Amino acid sequence: MFVIGYSFGDEHINNIVFQALTIPTFRLIALCSPDASGVIERLRALNDPRIWIIGGVGPTETRQGHFFDVFVEHFMPEPPGNKIDTAITKVMTELSAAAEEAETPSIVVDNE
């Protein structure tokens, strides 16, 4: 189970999480403040290697590592469609730089 943006304030959901921990293959990854109290403290106190509590310092003081936008921008894998665009951009940049060094005309690609 991957948890981001949930404060563990709903006892019904928390009960389901704790019940799920009785399943040996269950894993819990919770992105939250490292100094969070309450249920997070209880989970941390279990010392269960299947529970990962991730959070803390982010790219700026106001954007912590466990914030949703930071997670999306920095930790999520790039979508397959974007990987192709990124790869093409990288190749085109490298080819253009090589063309400039060789003093040959730049490469032009019309992708529309």
Image (cartoon, grey):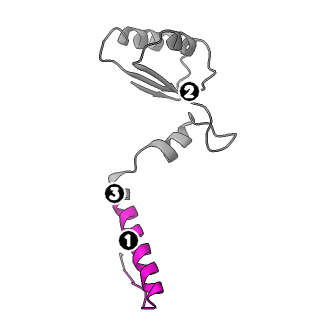
Residue at the spot of label 1: 91
Structural crowding at the residue carrying mark 2, measured as other residues with C-alpha within 10 Å and reported as few (<14), some (14–19) or many (≥20)? many
Element under disc 1 = helix
C-alpha span from label 1 to label 2: 38 Å
Q: Bounds of the magenta span?
A: 84-109
Q: Which numbered disc flags the more N-terminal residue, 3 or 1?
A: 3
Which amino acid type is marked by label 3? Gly
| Magenta span: chief secondary structure | helix
Q: Which residue is mark 3?
A: 81
Amino acid type of the residue that numbered disc 2 sits on in the rendered structure: Cys
For residue 77, above or below residue 5: below
The reply to whether the C-beta atoms of the residues labelled 1 and 2 are less than 8 Å apart is no
Q: Earlier in the sequence, mark 1 or mark 2?
A: 2
Residue 107 in which image quadrant = bottom left
Viewer-nearest of labels 3 and 1? 1
Q: What residue lies at 56% left-to-right and 33% top-to-bottom?
A: 66
Q: Residues within 10 Å of mark 3 (few under 14, many from 20)?
A: few
Q: Residue at 37%, 51% (x, y): give it.
A: 79
State the residue position of label 2. Answer: 32
Determine the residue positioned at 62% across, 44% down.
59
Q: Secondary structure at mark 3?
A: helix
The verdict on residue 70 being magenta is no
Residue 67: x %, y % from top left: 57, 36
Distance of label 2 from label 3 (alpha carbons): 30 Å
